[in-house]
Image (spheres, rainbow, N blue to C red):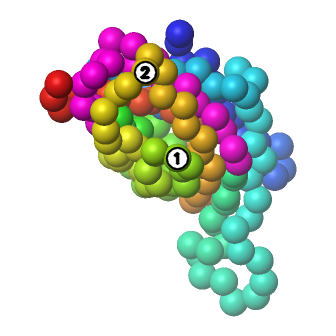
Amino acid sequence: MTAISRISLTVPFCVSLLLAMMAAPSANAEALRYKSAKASEVLLTPRWAFDGDGLSAEQLNTLVAELKAAELRFDVSRHIKSRVHIYLAMPTLVKGLRGTSGLRVEWLARGQFQAGSVSPGTRALVFAGLVTSAELVGQFDFTLTIDARSLQGPLGFDPAFEIEVIGK
């Protein structure tokens, strides 16, 4: 199994976004392979988060894109009967993004997975528990919030997950 899901964005006025997020695992973590029930590439179209008069500069430049009911299947076969933490990680440098701000990925999760959010250079816990089968399946609703002023080229979003064994 390999990470086969990629999220691409297109914004109004035909500006294309491709966010390549290949985060290196932390010192105690290893990359976690997963697959998605959706197509290998999902196109998202951001919308302006706010409209109306009297908006701040931040509100005027905020884009939002959503991916609902994304089913992810994590290959945890090497960790059966282990207590693990699984994280979603975003690298500090994101292709097409100027600096380390301007992008936040939030998610809601169903079942045994946890809701959370990440921005460049951070990671967040999505699962903590005992692995009892070769595959963990989760369903997520992702929301990407983008500051349009931070864009400097194509963005793409390829979720990077890490796993840490906490104990047996």
Cα distance, mark 2 to mark 1?
Answer: 15 Å
Q: Is residue 79 above or below residue 153?
A: above
Q: Is residue 77 above or below residue 145?
A: above
Q: Residue at x 69, y 89 (%)?
A: 54
Q: Please state which amino acid type lies under the numbered disc 1.
A: Gly
**Category of crowding for the residue at label 2, using alpha-carbon neighbours closer than 10 angstroms: few (below 14), some (14–19), many (at least 20):** few
Lower sequence index among marks 2 and 1: 1
**Observer able to see residue 165:** yes
Q: Residue 62 in the image: state x and y as whole percent.
A: 63, 65
As for residue 116 lying within the magenta part, the answer is: no
Q: Which residues are magenta?
A: 67-85
Q: Is residue 8 left or right of residue 150?
A: right
Q: Does the magenta stretch mainly form a helix, a strand or a loop?
A: strand
Q: Please state which amino acid type lies under the numbered disc 2.
A: Ser
Q: Is residue 125 above or below residue 168?
A: below
Occupied quadrant, residue 47: bottom right
Q: Residue 13 in the image: state x and y as whole percent.
A: 84, 50
Residue occupied by mark 1? 111
Which residue occupies the extreme bottom position in the image?
Answer: 54
Q: Residue at x 25, y 25 (%)?
A: 82
Residue occupied by mark 2? 133
As for residue 72 lying within the magenta part, the answer is: yes
Pick the front one: 13 or 139: 139
Q: Residue at x 59, y 45 (%)?
A: 140
Q: Name the disc covering residue 58, or none.
A: none
